[in-house]
Image (spheres, rainbow, N blue to C red):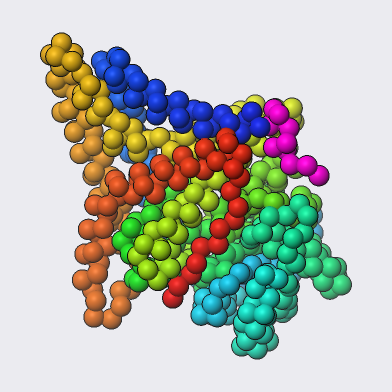
C-alpha cells in the first residue's frame, strides 16, 4: 500500500508546519527591520501571552505532582484486593482474570540495561503469574540479542506465566526498522499464542515499554485498578508519569535538564487528559490493539499515533487515562559528553517528528462526520500549537525579541514604547524565572537518593537549571525546526535508537 505522502494533497499538508515556522522567523526579522514599533508591540504581547501560559502550566504541573505523591504512597494491590472492583465491560472481568502482556523491543542494548528492566518487573507488587513477557529481538542483532535473551530467560523466565522471545526479520516491505515494527511482529506472534491459550482478548492489558523502562512496584496493581474501575476500559489508553531517573546521577547537566523538561511536560498534560496523547511507555486493551491492527510499522512516532488510530476507530470516543504511578527510563548518556549531546539532539528531533501527525489528522478528520467538530478541533489545535511553539517560542523570547530595539532608528527610540520596552521585557523574563526556580525545586524532589556520601550533588541539580535558556534553543527549537523542515522537504526521518550506557 503506497504511503499517504505519495498523494499531492497530503504532501501539501506536510509542508504547512514548516511554512508557518519559517514564516514566523523570517517575518519577525523583516518586521523588526522595517517596522520595529509594530514588532515591539507584537513581542511584548507574545511574551505576556507566554507568561500567562507559564503560570497556567505551573498550576497543572503542581497539581499532577500532588497526585503523584498521593498515588505512589498507596498499596494499590491491597486496594485492588480489598475493594475487589469488577470491570465495567460486558465480560465483568475480575482482577484475577486479568493478564498483563508486556512488549519489550530491543536492539543492541546491553545485558545490564535489560536485566534492570526485568528486575523491576520481578519486584512488582502484583502476582507475576499474570505476566506475559514478549522480548523482541531484531534480526540485525540476532546473535547478541538471542544470547542476552537466553540469559534473561534463565534468570527470570520461570517467574512469569509466559516468556516469549521473537526475532523481527529485516527488510519487511512496508516497514521501517524501529520500535513500532518490532512490536507489530511480536504482537502478531503473541496473538497466535494467546489464541492457543484461549484467553479472552478483553481480559488482557498490553503495555508497550522502551527496553530501559523500570516500573514502579505498584504500577501494575494501579493499572489494573484503573482498568477495572474505568467505565469504558477498552476505549482508553493508560499513560504513566515518565521519569528519567535510571542513570540520572551519571548523566551530564544538559541531558538531565532536557529529560526533566520532558517529565514536566508530561506531568502537566496528565492533569489535562482532554489533550493527552500516549507517549513512549503506555498501556491499553489488547482487544482494542487487535481491533485497530496493532501499531503502524512504518512510523517513527508509533507510540503517539496509536492513540489517533484508536480515536478514529471509535469515532472520537477514545481517551487517555493518566496514571500517576511512574515508570523510569534513562537520560541520554552515551559515555562521552559530546556523544551524549549529539544523541540527545537526535532524540529530541525524533520526538519532534510527532509533527507527522499534523497531515494525518487533517486528512482523516476532514471527512469524518461522526466525530464532533469540537473534539477534532481541540486535538488538532493542541498538537499544532504545541509543535509550532516548540519550534518558535524559545527563539522569539530569548533572541528575536531584542531585534526591534537593535534596528530601531533615532525617532523610534524616542517613543514611549521603545524606551520602556527593555524594562517590560526584563520584567516579563524575571517573572518567568520564578517559574523556572519552582520547576528546579520540583526536579530535585523527583530525584532518587544521591550516591552515598554525595549529598552535595543536590546543589548541582539546582544550579544546572541556569542552562535552561540555552537548552531551550539548542535542544528545543533547533531539533523541532529540523524535524518540520525535513517533513516539508520530504527527507523523512528514520528511527534512531538512543544508546544506553550504564
> Closest to the observer: 366 or 241?
366
Residue at x 73%, y 73% (from the top left corner): 166
Q: How many numbered marks does the figure carry?
A: 0
Residue at x 23%, y 21% (from the top left corner): 407
Q: Examine the rendered structure and indicate whether residue 199 appears above or below residue 261.
A: below
Image x and y of residue 52, in percent: 33, 33
Residue at the farthest bottom position: 154
> Residue 51 lies in magenta, yes or no?
no
Answer left or right for 362 relative to 454: right
> Closest to the observer: 180 or 326?
180
Q: Main secondary structure of the magenta part?
A: helix
Can residue 77 be seen by looking at this rendering? Answer: no
Answer left or right for 360 relative to 172: left
Dividing the picture into quadrants, the one containing residue 443 is bottom left
Residue at the farthest top position: 411
Q: Examine the rendered structure and indicate whether residue 340 appears above or below residue 38.
A: below
Can residue 121 be seen by looking at this rendering? Answer: yes
Name the image quarter holding the C terminus: bottom left
Dividing the picture into quadrants, the one containing residue 486 is top right
Name the image quarter holding the N terminus: top right
Image x and y of residue 314, in percent: 74, 42
Residue at x 78%, y 55% (from the top left corner): 173
Residue at x 73%, y 64% (from the top left corner): 170
Please provide the residue range marked out in magenta: 1-10
> Residue 5 lies in magenta, yes or no?
yes
Image x and y of residue 167, in percent: 73, 72
Image x and y of residue 49, in percent: 34, 29
Answer left or right for 147 relative to 260: right
Amino acid at each position: 500500500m503506497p504511503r499517504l505522502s505519495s498523494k499531492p494533497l497530503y504532501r501539501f499538508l506536510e509542508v504547512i508546519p514548516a511554512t508557518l515556522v519559517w514564516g514566523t522567523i523570517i517575518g519577525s526579522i523583516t518586521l523588526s527591520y522595517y517596522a520595529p514599533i509594530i514588532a515591539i508591540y507584537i513581542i511584548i504581547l507574545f511574551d505576556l501571552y507566554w507568561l500567562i501560559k507559564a503560570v497556567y502550566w505551573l498550576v497543572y504541573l503542581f497539581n499532577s505532582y500532588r497526585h503523584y505523591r498521593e498515588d505512589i504512597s498507596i498499596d494499590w494491590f491491597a486496594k485492588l484486593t480489598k475493594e475487589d472492583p469488577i470491570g465495567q465491560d460486558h465480560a465483568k472481568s475480575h482482577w484475577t482474570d486479568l493478564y498483563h502482556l508486556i512488549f519489550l523491543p530491543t536492539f543492541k542494548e546491553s545485558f545490564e540495561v535489560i536485566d534492570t528492566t526485568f528486575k523491576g518487573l520481578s519486584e512488582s507488587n502484583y502476582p507475576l503469574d499474570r505476566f506475559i513477557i514478549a522480548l523482541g529481538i531484531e534480526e540485525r542483532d540476532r546473535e547478541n540479542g538471542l544470547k542476552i535473551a537466553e540469559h534473561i530467560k534463565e534468570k527470570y523466565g520461570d517467574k512469569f506465566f509466559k516468556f516469549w522471545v521473537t526475532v523481527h526479520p529485516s527488510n519487511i516491505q512496508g516497514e521501517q526498522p524501529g520500535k513500532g515494527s518490532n512490536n507489530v511482529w511480536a504482537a502478531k506472534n503473541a496473538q497466535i499464542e494467546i489464541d492457543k491459550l484461549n484467553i479472552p482478548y478483553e481480559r488482557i492489558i498490553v503495555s508497550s515499554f522502551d527496553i530501559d523502562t523500570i516500573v514502579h512496584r505498584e504500577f501494575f496493581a494501579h493499572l489494573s485498578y484503573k482498568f477495572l474501575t474505568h467505565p469504558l476500559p477498552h476505549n482508553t489508553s493508560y499513560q504513566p508519569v515518565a521519569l528519567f531517573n535510571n542513570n540520572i546521577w551519571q548523566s551530564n547537566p544538559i541531558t538531565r535538564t532536557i529529560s526533566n523538561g520532558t517529565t514536566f511536560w508530561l506531568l502537566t498534560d496528565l492533569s489535562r487528559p482532554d489533550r493527552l496523547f500516549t507517549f513512549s511507555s503506555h498501556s491499553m486493551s489488547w482487544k482494542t490493539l487487535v481491533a485497530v491492527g496493532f501499531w503502524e510499522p512504518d512510523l517513527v512516532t508509533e507510540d503517539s499515533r496509536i492513540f489517533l488510530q484508536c480515536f478514529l476507530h471509535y469515532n472520537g470516543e477514545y481517551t487517555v487515562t493518566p496514571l500517576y504511578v511512574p515508570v523510569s527510563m534513562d537520560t541520554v548518556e552515551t559515555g562521552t559528553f559530546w556523544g551524549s549531546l549529539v544523541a540527545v539532539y537526535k532524540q529530541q528531533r525524533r520526538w519532534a517528528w510527532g509533527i507527522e501527525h499534523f497531515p494525518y489528522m487533517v486528512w482523516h478528520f476532514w471527512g469524518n462526520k461522526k466525530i464532533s467538530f469540537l473534539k477534532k478541533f481541540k486535538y488538532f489545535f493542541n498538537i499544532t500549537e504545541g509543535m509550532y511553539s516548540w519550534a518558535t517560542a524559545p527563539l522569539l523570547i530569548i533572541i528575536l525579541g531584542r531585534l526591534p530595539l537593535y534596528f530601531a532608528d533615532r525617532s523610534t527610540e524616542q517613543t514611549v514604547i521603545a524606551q520602556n520596552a527593555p524594562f517590560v521585557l526584563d520584567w516579563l523574563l524575571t517573572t518567568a524565572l520564578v517559574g523556572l526556580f519552582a520547576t528546579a525545586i520540583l526536579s530535585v524532589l523527583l530525584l532518587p537518593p544521591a550516591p552515598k556520601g554525595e549529598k552535595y550533588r543536590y546543589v548541582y541539580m539546582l544550579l544546572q537549571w541556569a542552562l535552561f535558556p540555552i537548552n531551550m534553543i539548542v535542544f528545543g527549537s533547533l531539533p523541532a525546526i529540523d524535524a518540520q523542515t525535513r517533513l516539508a522537504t520530504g527527507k523523512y526521518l528514520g528511527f534512531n535508537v538512543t544508546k544506553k550506557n550504564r
